[in-house]
Image (cartoon, helix red, strand yellow):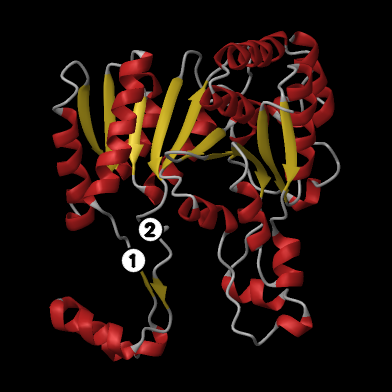
Amino acid sequence: MAKYKIAWLPGDGVGNDVMEAARLVLDALKFDAEYIHGDIGWEFWKHEGDPLPERTTEMMKDTDAALFGAITSKPKEEAAEELDAHLKDKGLVYFSPIVRLRQHFNLHTNLRPCKAYPGNPLNLKEGIDLVVFRENTEGMYGGVEFHPIPREVYDVLAKNHPKMKKFEAYGLENLAISTRIMSRQKCSNIVTQAFEYARTHGYKSVTVVDKPNVLRETGGLMIRTAREVAKNYPGIELWETNIDAQAMWLVKNPMDYGVMVAENMFGDILSDLAAQLVGGLGFASSGNIGDNYAVFEPTHGSAPKYAGKYKVNPMAMLLTSKLMLDWLGEKEMAVKLENAIAAVIKEGKVKTYDMGGNNTTLEVAEAVARSL
């Protein structure tokens, strides 16, 4: 019997390609796991009206962690158009399956390391070593939205906030609302995770990134909560920045920052920016981590035009596998995998098109496997 059960969720497009690369390397590591396939993605939306069937979430409850490839997402109207004929006009609304997974399993912490491995020609600067902590279940991605705005919702908002009244002139059918709901508990949790990581890994500061001068209530809650949490970590400085200024400073002075923490949408933007500093999304790994379960995914999209061509860089997926090994407690195996990845990057002989090479996804994975 295998030591671990891993939910295997290839998803859409190149998700299948990079997952195949991951399996090749994990097998070379002799990672003792049973991989259990799960249905997820655009095809299941089109044919079943659900991109995350209940059978998949039920299967995942009996696994130790999940590896996820990539997902295709489209706006509401386009998604509805692609439904099979018998599913149209049934009121089905597309909602991102990865966001649903985060909420369903309370995967509150999104961890995104961005590290400049020596020899990568795409690094902005050698020595960059950033980690972004992103609150994963609330904020702008909480999914509480309205279009058109129901009269009862508008009336409550207008009664409690005079600024709302001016929008009625446009007609409620022409208005849309996306909420940014944040709780003190989740703000405290994500900032605590960031400080714990900084303490464990020797970082001297944690930068909390928001926009409290404009988003006074939600941003203010995040900053006030961060200040309270910081009191428990006297050896680590708390820096506070606005998201727009942080984007500029991160490009200008990436070496000044180590651990950054933000709410859901700002963390998403910030982590993609940080990824570009070290080679782009082809090197961007992430973990969606809860108290008892975690889903690990590269942050790139499904790139449908490359699906099945084994063209894309698998390093993000391999680094994601490293994060999974870390979380499972397989520290020695995780270090071994990262060292092999770093060796292949430094040698520079086997590389995909984005790095100026012409090797395939699987050829890169095979090079990492040999380096092991």
Q: Residue at x 22, y 46 (%)?
A: 222
Residue 140 - label: 2
Q: Nearer the viewer, residue 133 or 119?
A: 133
Q: Nearer the viewer, residue 151 or 171?
A: 151
Quarter where residue 370 is shown: top right
Element carrying mark 2: loop
Residue 314 position within the rendered picture, expressed as x and y whole percent measured from the top left = 72, 31
Give the mark nearest the N terminus, 1 or 2: 2
Q: Is residue 249 visible?
A: no
The residues tagged by marks 1 and 2 sit, at their Cα atoms, a distance apart of: 6 Å
Element carrying mark 1: loop
- The residue carrying mark 1 is 179
Residue 90 position within the rendered picture, expressed as x and y whole percent measured from the top left = 64, 85
Whether residue 30 is situated above or below residue 22 in the rendered picture: above
Count the numbered circles shown.
2
Q: Nearer the viewer, residue 277 or 70?
A: 70
Mark 1 and mark 2 in contact? Answer it, CB < 8 Å. Answer: yes
